Amino acid sequence: MHNKGRRTIIVAKSFGFCSGVERAVSIVENLARQSKGVFTVDSILHNEREMARLEALGVKILNPNDSGEIVILPAHGATDIEVENLKSRFKKIIDVTCPFVIRTVNIIKKLKSEGYKIVIVGEKGHRETKVLKETAGESLFAVISDLEELAQFEKEYFSKIALVSQSTVSRGLSIDVSQFFLKHAFEFRFFDTVCPETVKRQEEAEVLAKSVDCVVVVGGKHSANTNRLYEIAKRINENALFVEDVDELRKFDISRCLKIGIVSGTSTPEYIIKEIVEYLESLP
Amino acid sequence: MHNKGRRTIIVAKSFGFCSGVERAVSIVENLARQSKGVFTVDSILHNEREMARLEALGVKILNPNDSGEIVILPAHGATDIEVENLKSRFKKIIDVTCPFVIRTVNIIKKLKSEGYKIVIVGEKGHRETKVLKETAGESLFAVISDLEELAQFEKEYFSKIALVSQSTVSRGLSIDVSQFFLKHAFEFRFFDTVCPETVKRQEEAEVLAKSVDCVVVVGGKHSANTNRLYEIAKRINENALFVEDVDELRKFDISRCLKIGIVSGTSTPEYIIKEIVEYLESLP
């Protein structure tokens, strides 16, 4: 908690990179210092400032025809097709996929070999969900991102169905979707693959949003876990703002907020939070 | 639907023995005709009239020191300890355990070998639940017969937990208990082992109870599935009666009921329903 002048600023306990992003960024940084031909598939994480910082160190985002020394797979994972394609173009492939995503991929492989239909709770366009979907292959039953999509399955009954989640969806949605399938299957198997770091931040956001005048949610606009934090904060506290960094925050008038809470996504570097706190403290 | 005089009598579509009881009774009857030393462990099913009929054919309920030719295990199953004990006392052991109970026993054995903690939704004193419990052995986590029992586990979190149900509990309870464990486990595995015949009768009882003046629930007082039917009927229609047979029904004054529904347990023979319908039709 920070108290300077008349404002109270409370930063949620969990902030800075989660362990998966921390690990990915540190591997990429080290490689960039050793080698000049370091490419990443897409962004390795969903934060523009952080990606710009890595680019300044020499890391390049892959174009379709690039080839070279080292290519780094994203923390959100890569599909087998992507990996196959990269093998012919690069000498080394470095996999920085988050361990929680790898765990889910392995669960899906096992479920597939045991004959389950697989439901993935996830965002349809998100890289991680695409990877999980490709892993499920023919065993995929559906990707669900909204409870309303379940209406179409109201009359179905399954013998063996299993559910896993993208690591950064809302744990509540994952459980709600499960409750539906419980009633529609002889065997229903549930894996709580929402990453614990994500769940913790969701819980902290919920508590914090109740006790402050305004909530500042900090993170990349493409970051699924940050979007969930914003949804949670906004549902509880109508004065919730979603910003990528301090420059974006400056555009809002928050002069009437005397108690401000800050929550942030797992790919938001600590220095962005620090800048925001300093800015808020400097306000009259 | 029967219409004689001013009364309408509606018998639920599903009545008479379920397939498991049908099979058990026919095996016992055949054996009793061939051999004189036929014993059954406990009652093979929960209906006193039907057990009396089988006794008249020469079937005896086992006493602790009996021994002889043939012993028949109950449709609700027998524990390994019971079977071991009987092997030394009888030449032949005939297993008429309901196939749905055998299926649940096999599921529990598999879950046990895969390292799950096992929750059984069931009635604590019921023979089937005792058999399932003994099968689970050290892997048993708890037998749950009421949602209120879950409060004690509110703060627990499990890595692998699985749930099966006694074949004759309410499917709704089984799902409600599952909803609790969904929130408390990394992996939760659910098997809908409530027997389909039981579920069907529960659903029919619910629909019928809404459309009649009185509901007559027919079955043995120790019959779990009949008790569930009575609970369902009584919740919807306060004029619900639970009787074993027509003699018990005669004790009630139902002269004011003009539209009467009849639902019955899976161990209630057809002739008992027939007697009840005839009695109701004969009323002024």
Image (cartoon, coloured by chain):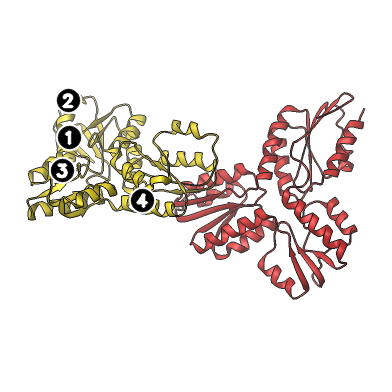
Chain colours: A yellow, B red
Residue identified by numbered label 2: A251
Chain on which label 3 sits: A
Q: Position of residue B103 (x, y in %)?
A: 62, 56
> Within the image, what quadrant is residue B283 found in?
top right
Counting residues from the start of the chain, the first of labels 3 and 4 encountered is: 3
- Between circles 3 and 4, the one closer to the viewer is 3
- In the rendered structure, which amino acid carries the disc numbered 3? Leu
Both on one chain, marks 3 and 4? Answer: yes
The answer to whether one can see residue A201 in this image is no
Q: Look at the picture and state if B97 lies above or below B282.
A: below
Tell me the mark number nearer the camera, choosing from 2 and 4: 4
The residue tagged 3 is: A62
In the rendered structure, the answer to whether residue B184 lies left or right of residue B168 reads left
Whole-Å distance between the Cαs marked 2 and 1? 11 Å
Mark 3 or mark 2, which is nearer the start of the sequence? 3
Q: Can you give x and y, in whole percent of width and height, for residue A127 in the image?
A: 28, 41
From the viewer's perspective, is B59 left or right of A133? right
Q: Distance between the residues labelled 3 and 1?
A: 25 Å
Q: How far apart are marks 2 and 3 (CA)?
A: 33 Å
Q: Name the residue under label 1.
A: A245
- Among numbered discs 3 and 1, the one appearing first in the sequence: 3
Is B128 situated left or right of A124 in this image?
A: right
Look at the numbered disc 3 and give the secondary structure of its residue: loop
Q: Residues within 10 Å of mark 4 (few under 14, many from 20)?
A: many
In this rendering, does residue A12 appear at all?
yes
Which amino acid type corresponds to the residue marked 1 in the rendered image? Asp
Q: Which of marks 4 and 1 is in front?
A: 4
The Cα–Cα distance between marks 3 and 4, rounded to whole angstroms, is: 26 Å
Q: Which of marks 4 and 1 is nearer the N terminus?
A: 4
